[in-house]
Structure formats: C-alpha cells, structure tokens
Amino acid sequence: MSDKDLLSLFDARMRAAAVPDEPGARIEAADGVIRQVGATPRDWHGVLYSTLDAATAEAAIDSEIARFGALLGPGGEFEWKAYSHDRPADLAARLARAGFRPGAPETLFVAEITQLAAGLPSALPSALPPAPPPGVTLRPVTTASDADLVAEATEAAFGDGGQRARDRVLARLAADPDTVWTWVAMADGRPVSAARMLVHPGTGFASLWGGGTAPEWRGRGIYRSLVAHRMRLAAELGCEYLQVDATDDSRPILERLGFRALSVTTPYEYRF
C-alpha cells in the first residue's frame, strides 16, 4: 500500500470513525469536527479529527473553545490533535491565533503487520530482537501492584505523570481488559520503562503508547525490545496495522522494524 493510501486508511478508521480510548469517554461529531469528551475533568478531552476548510475553520475553532469551556470551566484544558496533512493548510496558525499552545511534535508511524508477518516464521523474527537486553525482563501488567510499577517507571522516564498512567491502566483493565496489553521493563529490581498496546476492534489497527525509559537505561535496546514484543503480539492477534506517534529519537528504530513515517502530529493545548 502506498504511503498516501495508508495515511487515508488511518484517517478513515482511526480518526473519522474514532471510538473512545478511555473508559467512560464518549465521541461526539458536529460541524466537521470529531471530538472525545472524557468522563471526568481529569481525563483527556480534545479534537481528534476535522474536515474543515478556509471558510469553516474559524467558526469551528471558536465553537470548540466554547463547547469545552462550558464543559470544563476555569482551569480546564483540552487538546486539538492536529496533523501536518490536515486542512486547511494553515490550521496550525489559526489554532495559535485562537490561543492554543503547541506541544512537542511527533511523527505518525504505521507498519503493515500483514506484510511483515507474511514471512513468518522467518522474516518477522529476523527483523526483531529475540529478547530484551541483558539484565532486563519484561513483566506483564495485570494487577494493581503491577500498575504501581507503571507509575514508578513513568515517573523515572518523564519526571511526572505516574498517577495518571496508573489510573489509566487500572481503568482499562477493569473496563476492557481484552483490548489493552501493558508491560513494565524491570532492571536491577526496579521498573525503568513501561509500554502498552491498545487493540482497536473493527479497525484492523493496534496502537503503541509509552516506552519512555529512565535516563540511565537509555540506549541499551529497551525501547526496541518493547516495540518488537508488541509487534509480535499484534501479529498473533491478527492485527493488520500498527500505529505509533514517536519522536525523532525513535525514528531509526521504528524504520528498521518496518514502520513508515506518514505525517507529523502536534498537540495544540487550550487552557481556560
């Protein structure tokens, strides 16, 4: 499949036909905008997709600010997840003028699992490392105590976000355990990285999240091992495509594993 066709498929299945990715959240569609509304103010709220043009963009942006402002109130925030191929071409500039603040951009990567898995049992294993690096084990997350390790690993990698990561894991395990797989990388008896994979039923896609690693353990192959581990599981589950948003640091690893860079996504955040 060409990059253009693969990107169109991603937009159609994962954005235009999005389903909630957090328990209790809901998807709303109105006036060319697809948004997710969380169950609580602490959950993620934002715009996932839009089909706008130069004539409709300003009104849609103003409408989303008003919609989320009424919902979240002072101190609340929501995100417009914009992609470099979205229209109108100056959507990012329009969001900035409306008061949105851009976060760090990431590249959208997609791998065609069916193509990579076609050569099993030879082709896929030859592209993927057979095991975690020496001294590292991957522990599946299935209990509340495991979720505590996810929180610790998240804090070690990013400096914050541990409680939210723990809450997200526990909520998904309780509400829909068949669609989420999470692992913690353990080294020297402590968690140094955590990563999860979500399966999106009916789309053919699975998506990768997390994978940040404690600074002292970076550059040793943990991220690559976690990606490879999830790729194998995605193939076993019959997924056709695997998607991840990643920084430039991860690009060489992902491209060696068969991922293709399709677009750039930037979170535009608005705080009331």
Image (cartoon, rainbow, N blue to C red):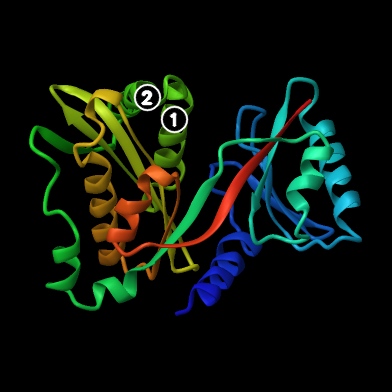
Question: Picture quarter containing residue 66?
Answer: top right
Quarter of the figure with the N terminus? bottom left
Residue 36 % position (x, y): 67, 47
| Disc 2 crowd, CA 10 A, few/some/many (<14, 14-19, 20+) | many
What is the secondary structure assignment of the residue under circle 2? helix
The residue identified by callout 1 is 165
Residue 10 picture location, percent across and down: 54, 66
Quadrant showing the C terminus: top right
Q: Position of residue 175 (x, y in %)?
A: 46, 43
Residue depicted at x 15% and y 54%: 129
The residue lying at 88 percent from left, 43 percent from top is 62
- For residue 201, above or below residue 216: below
The image quarter in which residue 139 lies:
top left
What is the number of the mark on residue 151? Answer: 2
Which amino acid is tagged 2?
A: Ala
SS at mark 1 in the image: helix
- Tag 1–tag 2 contact (CB < 8 Å): yes
State the CA–CA distance, disc 1 to disc 2.
6 Å
